Image: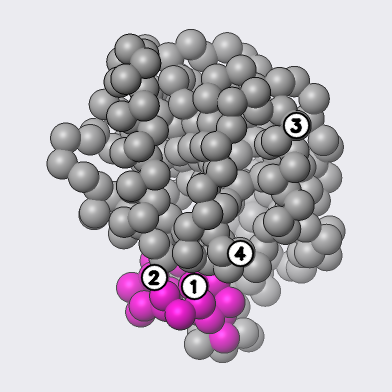
Amino acid sequence: MKVVLIPGMDGTGFLFAPFIEVAPAGIEVISLPLLQRADADYDDQAKHIIASIGEEPIVLVAESYSGMVAYSMLKMGLPNIRHIVFAASFLGRPSALALWARHIPAALLKSNIVPKFILSKLLFGHFTKEKLVSLFDKALHAVSSETLSFRLNQIAMLPNPNIPIDIPCTYIRPTGDNLVSKRAIKVFQRLCRNLEIKEVDGTHFVLQTNPEMCWLVIQDVIESLKTTSHL
C-alpha cells in the first residue's frame, strides 16, 4: 500500500526524514516535494503532485500548508486517492497569527535573530532534538525568500472553501499546536462527510515529534480500507 506525503510550507520534504525512518514494514512511502516557484499557487501545486503519483490507490498525507494542495487535488478529480490524512493542517486561515506572519520579511525567518533554543522549543516543544532543529534549518534555507513570502501571504488570505469532500478523511490534531488554532478543525467538520479526528501528543510538527503514534493512525486507516475492500 502506497502512502504519499506532501510537505508543509517549506515544500522540500526534508522534514519527513524522521517520519519515513520509522515507517512500518510493508508500507511503501513516497515524499513528493512541492514546486519551488514563487508564483506557484495551490492549483499549480496540485497539478504537479497529480502528475507525480500515478494511478494506483494511495493514502495521501497532507502536512500543514499542503492541506489546501490536497483539497485542490480533489477538486480536479483524482479517483485513486482512497483516504486523506490531514496532519496539523488547515483549509481556511489557521489563526490570527497568520495575518501578522505575512508581514514578516522572509529573510528574517532565515536569520539567527531568534535564538535556536527558543525556536526549537516553539516548534518542537519537549520533543526537541538537535536533528529536528538541523532539518528545519536545512529546509528553510533551501527555499527562496520570495517563495516563503508568497506562501505566507497565501495562508493569510485563505478563503473558506465550500466544496464538500466525499472521500474518507482523518485529521491528526496535535495536542500542542502553537501555529494552528483548534478552531481550524471546524472547516474540516463542515466539508468532510466522513471525518475522524485523532488527537496525538506533539507540536505542530506532529509527524516529526511523534512519528510512531502518527504511523499507528495511518496503519488503522490502511486496515480499514482493506476491510471495506477498497484496496
Q: For the residue carrying disc 4, how many other residues have a C-alpha within 10 Å: few (<14), some (14-19), or many (20+)?
A: many
Q: CA distance from mark 3 to mark 2?
A: 34 Å
Q: For the residue carrying disc 3, how many other residues have a C-alpha within 10 Å: few (<14), some (14-19), or many (20+)?
A: some
Image location of residue 100, percent across then percent down: 83, 65
Q: Secondary structure at mark 1?
A: helix
* Residue located beneath label 1 in the image: 124
* Closer to the camera in the image, 67 or 116: 67
Is residue 131 found inside the magenta-colored segment of the image? yes
Q: CA distance from mark 2 to mark 4?
A: 16 Å
Query: What segment is highlighted magenta in the picture?
Result: 118-136
Give the number of the mark in front: 2 or 4: 4
* Residue located beneath label 3 in the image: 190
Q: Residue at x 61, y 64 (%)?
A: 177
First-in-chain label (2 vs 4): 2
Residue type at mark 3 is Arg
Residue type at mark 2 is Leu
* Residue located beneath label 2 in the image: 132
Q: Secondary structure at mark 2?
A: helix
Q: CA distance from mark 1 to mark 2?
A: 8 Å
First-in-chain label (3 vs 2): 2
Q: Is residue 21 visible?
A: yes
Q: CA distance from mark 4 to mark 3?
A: 21 Å
Give the number of the mark in front: 4 or 1: 4
